[in-house]
Image: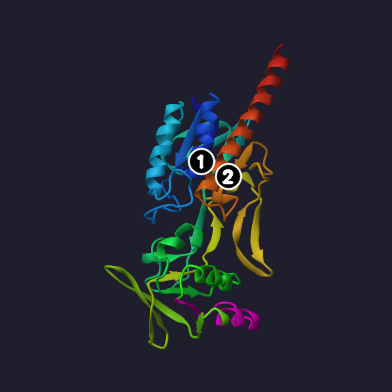
Amino acid sequence: MLDKYDVVVVGGGAAGLSGAVALGRSRRSVLVVDAGEQRNAPAEAMHNYLGREGLNPLELVAIGREEVAAYGGSTVRARVSDVSVVAGGFLVALDNGVSVEARRLLLATGLLDELPEIEGLAECWGNDVIHCPYCHGYEHRDQAIGVLVTTPMSVHQALMFRQLSDDVVVFAHTGPAISADDRAQLDALGVRVIEGEVSAVESHSGGLSGIRLASGEVVPRQVLVIGPKFEARLDGLKGLGLEVVPMAIGDFVLGHSVKADANGKTDVPGVWAAGNVANPMAQVVISAGQGLMAGAQINADLIMEDARAAVAAR
C-alpha cells in the first residue's frame, strides 16, 4: 500500500521548506522531496534575508529541514522521476524506486542557470562570477568589476554595479549591440566598453584575476558580472502539462518559468508553484515568502475539500 500525503513538496530550498512548515503547522501530512540541487549552493553566504544575513545557504536548508521535522513533516533525498494524475490527487514516482500519493503538489524546484560557455567561468560561478548586485554586490564593493554583455539588461547591470565601484568596465563580447544612448550613459559614468569576444576567465587560488579576450589581451578584474539564461527545473514533472511562459525583453528571451498566479496556483488543478521555478527574480527571502503563501493557499483548498466531503458523507 502506498504512503499517502496531503501534500508532496518537490524541492527542498527556501520556498519548498517554508511551504512545508506552514502546512505542517496546519497539521497536514507533508513529504519534501529534495534532490539537493539548491541554486545558491555555490555561494558562501546569502544576503538581504532579515535575521539571517550572511548565513550559508546550505545552513538555512539544514535549519529548514529541522523545522519541517518539528511539525511532523518528512524529507527524502530523491528526485521525482514521474508524476501522474490519479483519483484524489497525484501519484509521485521517485528515482529511489518509491512511489507515494499526494492530494496536492507544491513545486519549488527552482531554476537552472545556463551560463555562457567561456573557459573558467563556471568554476567561479556564485563567488567571483555573479549576476545580482543585491545578492552579492556589496561584498565586491570598490573592486575591479567587469560586466559581460549577454542580454539587453547587461548595460543596466553595469549601471547598478557602478554604484558599488568606481572601477567598472563592460565587455561587449558577442552580446546584443550597445545603443548610442547606453554608451553615452556608460561614458558619462566613467564605464569603459571593451570590444572583442571574451575567451576565458582567469583565476588563481585567491580568486578571479582577469578576463582574457580572443585577441590574447588580459584585462585585470576581480569579479565578472553576467546575465545567465533562466530555465525552470521541471525534470520528472512534464507529465503534469504545466504551462511554461517566457521571460523576455522584446524579442530576446531571458528564460522560462512556470505560469502561476500571485498565490502560486498554476493552471493545473491541485498544483502550486513557489520560488524561482515561477519567479526567476525572487531572492531567497522572497522565495520563502512565496512558499509560505502557497502553503497557506493549499491548506485552504484542502479545508474546503474536506468540508465538502463531510457534507456529502452526512
Residue 88 appearing in the image: no
Which secondary structure lies at badge 2? loop
* Residue depicted at x 37% and y 65%: 124
Does 178 appear in magenta?
Answer: yes
Mark 1 sits on what residue?
16
Q: Residue at x 48, y 51 (%)?
A: 48
The coloring applied to the image is: rainbow
Q: How many labels sit on residues?
A: 2
How packed mark 1 is, by other alpha carbons closer than 10 Å (few <14, some 14-19, many 20 or more), is many
Q: Is residue 183 visible?
A: yes
* Disc 2 + disc 1, Cβ < 8 Å: yes
Cα separation, mark 2 vs mark 1, equals 7 Å
Please determine whether, in this image, residue 159 is positioned above or below residue 108.
below
Q: Quadrant of residue 66?
A: top left
Residue 249 vs 87, above or below: the answer is below
Q: Secondary structure at mark 1?
A: helix
Q: Residue at x 61, y 40 (%)?
A: 272
Q: Measured from the top left, where is residue 78 in percent x and y?
A: 42, 42
Q: Earlier in the sequence, mark 2 or mark 1?
A: 1
170, 214: nearer the viewer:
170
Task: For the C terminus, give its image quadrant.
Answer: top right
Q: Quadrant of residue 84?
A: top right
Above or below, 148 relative to 114: below
Considering every residue shown, the one lying at the far top of the view is 314
Q: Residues within 10 Å of mark 2 (few under 14, many from 20)?
A: many
Callout 1 amino acid = Gly
Q: Which residue is mark 2?
A: 274
Q: Nearer the viewer, residue 69 or 109?
A: 69
Left or right position of 137 against 292: left
Magenta stretch holds residue 265: no
Q: Which residues are magenta?
A: 167-187
